[in-house]
Image (cartoon, coloured by chain):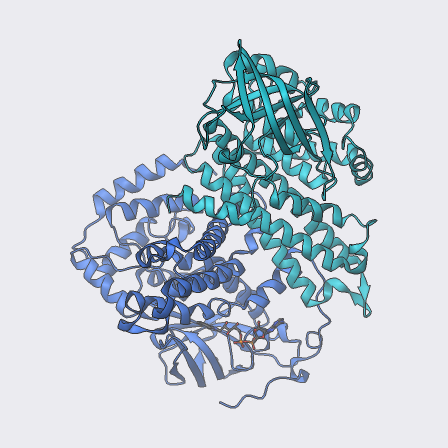
Amino acid sequence: MRFSFTSEQDEFRTIVRRLLDARSPVSEVRRLMATDAGWDRDAWRKINQELGLTAIHVPEAYGGQGFGYAELAIVLEEMGRGLLCAPFFSTAALATTAILNAGTEAQKQALLPSIAAGDTTATLAFSEDDGGNDAASVAMTATSSGGAWRLDGVKSFVLDGHTADIVVVLARAPGSSGESGLSFFTVAGDAPGLQRRRLKTMDETRKLARLQFNGVEAQLLGEAGTAAAPFARTLQQAAVLLANEMVGGAEKLRQSALDYAKMRMQFGRSIASFQTTKHKAADMLADVELAKSAAYYAAAAVDENDDDMPAVASLAKACAAEAYLQTAIHAIQIHGGIGFTWDNDTHLWFKRAKSSEILFGDANHHRELMLQRWGH
Amino acid sequence: MDMPSESTVRAEVRAWLEANWDPALGLVEWRNKLADSGWGAPHWPKEWYGRDLPQALASVVDEEFARIGAVGVAKAGIRTLAAATILAHGTSLHKEKFLRRILTGEDTWCQLFSEPGSGSDMAAAVTRADFKGNKWVINGQKVWTTSAHRADWGLLLARANWDVPKHKGLAYFILDMKQPGVQVHPLRQMNGHASFNQVFFTDAMVEPEFLMAEVGDGWTVATTTLMHERRGADSLRSWATASKREGRIYDEERAEIATTMEPYKWYPQRAGRVDLVLERAKATGKINDPVIRQEIARLLIMAKTAEWTARRARAAQEQGRPQGPEGSLGKLVSSHVARAAARVHTYIAGADALLSGEDGALDGVIAEILVSVPATSIAGGTDEIQRNIIAERVLRMPKEPSVDTDKPFRDVPRNTVSS
Ligand SMILES: Cc1cc2nc3c(=O)[nH]c(=O)nc-3n(C[C@H](O)[C@H](O)[C@H](O)COP(=O)(O)OP(=O)(O)OC[C@H]3O[C@@H](n4cnc5c(N)ncnc54)[C@H](O)[C@@H]3O)c2cc1C
């Protein structure tokens, strides 16, 4: 439903939140973000298997739980709130979605069960060195000879690209351009000829990698030359999921800034009693609640296969981007000097707000897309 | 209680309309039928002209009326606040005397809260109510009173006790506006209309049975009125428009819109007219300007998410769940939307935004938007007061130190107002 959650969904949210609070406190986030991988296979497996998180939106026929994007969005909202360091967005939101959108029946049977079970992590590699988010900016080539495909070129800004077991790659037939000639491929993370380098990221909780492909052997996913549509849909769904992750983080920041304001005393009274703080808090509430409304509405639109979903996806992403960043700015300000320190946790979410703002296109980009998708 | 399903309600109202709707009826005659059947105010209680339906099902009834162009009960303005307040706090005498005539539109109401010295600080009202002989005698002045010049009755907040703190000494009355002790002077607004007024009381009389609740409860009763006013803030977008259909009842409805509803005719403009933005942008070619496209998109996102947030709040209410904080944001957010819309309309109109009336864009509608939107963030509680309420009541932030709430009102420093 677009305007409310069922009691089962509310209960599910509570369970996810409890699990993440217990297994991924900020101390754990700080530990993992300082590692090269950015996550810990054993720790993640435990969290994942407890609730079958990577199986949520995978149909039962492929070993999943058969829930919808609304449930997946709930998981992401909670992960955004907890800033979980795990290859979940890359595996579930990106790679699984791409496989569901593009793969043949046999490929889904082959790929999804081990992803759903949490044995395999995966990601989607589409952007290249220019950071573009559209089909037209794909330059990587795929050539076939004797029934085998080989990929050449560079992918960058790949979420968890340095650790993913499977990389879903978007590449094109040599000489093709725009939306034609595009195909999806799957590549093993340790395939010969694939060089992976972790990039230093501003938001350390979200690891990105640059992948160099030199004649890497790849398996075609779906039909050759037809990836433009499933890719577009995958990005729209990913934008919706990211918007939900973002409102989770924004809500967390809003709440922690409010708690701090109520506790901090200056001039003999709580800073929460100063009207300027109160008005900021009221504005933050409005920003976050409106962004939630958009994110929830968009997730329901994905499940209902609404024709309006592509426009609404961009709406939700643009709205969440501004709300999250504005909330983060207010949150740091309300904390004062301590808010600018490394030890205070606010900056972790501030940086997540920044990285999320840019990932898959910024608010200007999505506002324009929204109007175009509405036919204006 | 068993809630009927949407399809049952739809079928029932359809059948009833089929049997009863007749555009040749008189407006009041028809609305009396609506009151008797409960279809005019389906969300009201069964004993009082309603059907106890939740808001969602009441909207189904509205849809059925709209589908065949059937006229509804009198809406618009303060009469709906009067009804809500009377339903919550009124005696059966009040309900008997006023509710039906509110539905039929025979009575028009106004809200006598703000005074020259007390607007946001409404509890600091200094209009006096003194019990003399066997009546309440009212002296003082109200201001910005919307539709007072048309009103038969007023919801009056006045001070009956000066020796207790300000919130405790207020009384809430239903005041007969058509009496010699009440004088109404229209006030011209910055948009040229004169829908609000100054109201002067010189020994105006109120019968004792027209006191609502008890002396000292005035603040509590006024809070109910305000809550309904603020909650209704988003519904300003869908204001009643005259039907072009033929028939006696439509003629009478058009006459009503031109008279008792006249003070509200600029209200759609005050909400910003988001509905006009895209068609205006296309008509002017500004839709091709990438900067203006960004502004339009921002506005549409704000308006859509405001609407969805209101729907979330309503959904919670309908499912009988506690409303989340989203339910308290409507009024504040509608100001943001209105302001953003005025800005976008300005960019779209360009030089035409310099003109008004028939020289202005869209026959003056755009100019009217630009000079009406400032009312949105003031009327019914300013944006600043809304933020205070959200912070203190929803987010439970501490109140600022107060200098006036604990002492007798008599000793509180206040504005000296010359009128
Ligand atoms: C179109 C229109 C229709 C109206 N209709 C009616 C009506 O029918 N009946 C009626 O009774 N009234 C009506 N009003 C009056 C309206 O309710 C008041 O104007 C409003 O509540 C503000 O009060 P004020 O004008 O006295 O301004 P003030 O209260 O003096 O406020 C002036 C400024 O100070 C700010 N301020 C005041 N207190 C605080 C505080 N505690 N914290 C922060 N800032 C503060 C305000 O936000 C505002 O910016 C109407 C007003 C308009 C514009």
Res B44 seen here: yes
Q: Residue at x 41, y 85 (%)?
A: B181
Q: Residue at x 62, y 31 (%)?
A: A155
Figure check: B129 above or below A212? below
Figure check: A313 above or below B202? above
As rendered, which of B148 and B82 lies closer to the eye? Answer: B148
Res A63 seen here: no
Figure check: B380 above or below B395? below
In the rendered image, residue B172, in percent from the top left (x then y), is placed at: 51, 71
Q: Give the tally of numbered discs.
A: 0
In the rendered image, residue B102, in percent from the top left (x then y), is placed at: 35, 62
Quarter of the image for residue B27 reads bottom left
Q: Residue at x 66, y 58 (%)?
A: A281
Please state if A355 lies on the left or on the right of B52 as rendered.
Answer: right
As rendered, which of B173 and B140 lies closer to the eye? Answer: B140
As rendered, which of A66 and A1 lies closer to the eye? Answer: A66
Quarter of the image for residue B83 reads bottom left
As rendered, which of A27 and B190 lies closer to the eye? Answer: A27
Please state if B50 lies on the left or on the right of A185 as rendered.
Answer: left
Chain letter corresponding to the colour cyan:
A
Chain letter corresponding to the colour blue:
B
